[in-house]
Image: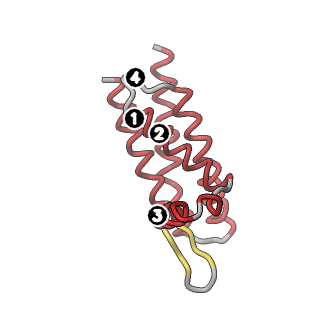
């Protein structure tokens, strides 16, 4: 049952990565899932155009979450590595939401941080027992 709870939290964390919200310019905005789809379509035509640490590191984090989701027993180090990789992007989104101040951007990052904290607590709890 313990692994099942971790899997549910990993799934929720993975899904929360698609709902980060960004705004720029006068009338430009996007959810992260829209930006990812655009990056994939550009990456098919010109892979070098999307090779940037700020796109690759969070994407690798998402892949690590997917891998850990399908493991028999999710590995703590894999999930922590994914949280760190994605946390770089969501930390920046949170920072932008705070200094903006833009409540839409700020609120869009909170599910990621909530599920990250719950997942880390779950790993700690299972480590102690």
Label 4 crowd (10 A; few <14 / some 14-19 / many >=20): few
User: How far is mark 1 from mark 2, CA to CA?
Assistant: 6 Å
Label 2 with label 3: CB-CB less than 8 Å: no
Residue 5 visible, this orientation: yes
Looking at the rendered structure, the secondary structure element under dot 3 is helix
Looking at the rendered structure, the secondary structure element under dot 2 is helix
Where does residue 35 sit, x and y in percent of width and height? 51, 66
Q: Please name the residue that numbered disc 2 is placed on.
A: 65
Of 72 and 19, which appears nearest the observer?
72
| Colouring method of the image | secondary structure
Q: Please name the residue that numbered disc 4 is placed on.
A: 73
Q: Is residue 123 left or right of residue 72?
A: right
Where does residue 51 sit, x and y in percent of width and height? 65, 56
Looking at the rendered structure, the secondary structure element under dot 4 is loop
Q: Which mark is residue 37?
A: 3
User: How far is mark 2 from mark 4, CA to CA?
Assistant: 13 Å
């Amino acid at each position: 049952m313990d692994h099942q709870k971790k899997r549910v939290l990993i799934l929720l964390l993975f899904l929360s990565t698609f709902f980060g919200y960004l705004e720029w310019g006068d009338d430009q905005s996007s959810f992260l899932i829209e930006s990812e789809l655009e990056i994939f379509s550009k990456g098919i035509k010109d892979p070098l155009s999307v090779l940037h640490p700020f796109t690759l590191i969070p994407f690798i984090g998402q892949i690590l979450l997917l891998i850990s989701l399908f493991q028999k027993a999710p590995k703590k180090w894999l999930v922590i590595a994914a949280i760190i990789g994605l946390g770089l992007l969501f930390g920046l989104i949170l920072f932008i939401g705070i200094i903006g101040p833009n409540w839409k951007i700020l609120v869009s990052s909170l599910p990621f941080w909530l599920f990250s904290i719950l997942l880390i607590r779950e790993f700690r709890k299972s480590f102690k027992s």
